[in-house]
């Protein structure tokens, strides 16, 4: 791309106009957004893995380090893909740890740190007046059931694309193609927001517009760059 500093030595006002035009083109995507797609955890739902890990480790009678290592070994993302039920996961954990966790204990501790960000959900109500909203989340059945029962998260969205239902997880391309399949939209008309950069890059690889969520103030700034006013 042409650098502003390489513009030929022409009239100052004209040169300034060219420089401003270049800056605008760099900051503003040349596309029309028709669909907003949001991640859940880390965007409008908080989740403290450390709290969950310590609670489950204590209930299982092992160290947090031992619990994490065992969980990673027996899970391997199958729970988020819907290829491992809660019963199967708890049984695997008990067998590997020599523990006696019940499913009820697991559900309570597994969901103990989940909470909803009211500022973000209020923003969703504003956005719904301008765009359809989709949810695209790597999540398991236990977490989603809890969130739906307590916060009715589905009320914010026109469509829910959940990893444990579709069998794919971000940043695998198949889960982003599910967005395009259900919406019938071209990738350039979709804007995806996620708190994890690898998931953002996965969306961009499929052609979606995407950026990383770092907070509400930054979200408004980035929305403004896409011509979205809230």
Image (cartoon, grey):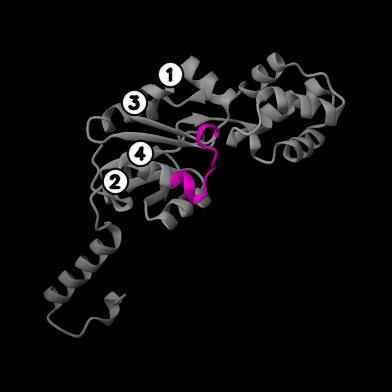
- Does 223 appear in magenta? no
In the image, 24: left or right of 143? left
For marks 4 and 3, give the CA distance. Answer: 25 Å
Quadrant in the rendering for residue 37:
top left
Q: CA distance from mark 3 to mark 1?
A: 13 Å
Q: Mark 1, mark 4: which one is toward the viewer?
A: 4
Decide if residue 21 is on the left or right side of residue 216: left
Q: Position of residue 169 (x, y in %)?
A: 54, 42
Foreground residue, 174 or 171? 174
Q: What is the x, y in percent for residue 229?
A: 23, 40
| Alpha-carbon span between mark 1 and mark 2 | 27 Å
Instruction: Name the secondary structure under disc 3.
Output: helix
Real-space CA distance between mark 2 and mark 3, rounded to the nearest whole angstrom: 26 Å
Q: Which residue is mark 2?
A: 185
What residue appears at the point 78 percent right and 19 percent down from the top-left corner?
101
Residue 213 seen in the figure: no
- Label 3 sits on residue: 122
Residues marked 1 and 2 touching at CB (< 8 Å): no
Name the N-terminal-most of marks 1 and 4: 1
**Mark number for residue 12?**
none
Nearer the camera: disc 4 or disc 3: 4
Q: Which mark is residue 152?
A: 1
Looking at the image, which residue is at 24% across and 54% down?
Answer: 31
Q: Which residues are magenta?
A: 164-176
């Amino acid at each position: 791309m042409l650098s502003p500093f390489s513009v030929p030595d022409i009239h100052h006002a004209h040169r300034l106009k060219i420089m401003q035009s270049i800056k605008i083109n760099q900051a503003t995507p040349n596309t029309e957004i028709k669909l907003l797609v949001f991640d859940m955890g880390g965007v409008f739902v908080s989740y403290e893995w450390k709290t969950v890990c310590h609670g489950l480790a204590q209930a299982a009678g092992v160290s947090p380090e031992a619990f994490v290592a065992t969980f990673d070994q027996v899970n391997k993302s199958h729970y988020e893909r819907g290829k491992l039920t809660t019963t199967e996961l708890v049984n695997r954990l008990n067998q590997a740890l020599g523990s006696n966790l019940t499913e009820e204990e697991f559900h309570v501790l597994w969901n103990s740190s989940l909470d909803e960000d009211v500022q973000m959900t209020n923003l969703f109500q504003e956005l719904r007046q301008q765009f359809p909203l989709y949810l695209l989340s790597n999540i398991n059945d236990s977490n989603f059931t809890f969130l739906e029962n307590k916060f009715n998260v589905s009320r914010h969205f026109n469509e829910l694309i959940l990893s444990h239902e579709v069998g794919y997880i971000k940043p695998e391309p198949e889960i982003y193609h599910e967005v395009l399949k259900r919406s019938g939209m071209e990738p350039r008309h979709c804007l995806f927001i996620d708190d994890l950069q690898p998931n953002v890059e996965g969306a961009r690889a499929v052609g979606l517009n995407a950026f990383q969520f770092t907070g509400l103030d930054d979200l408004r700034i980035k929305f403004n760059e896409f011509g979205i006013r809230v």
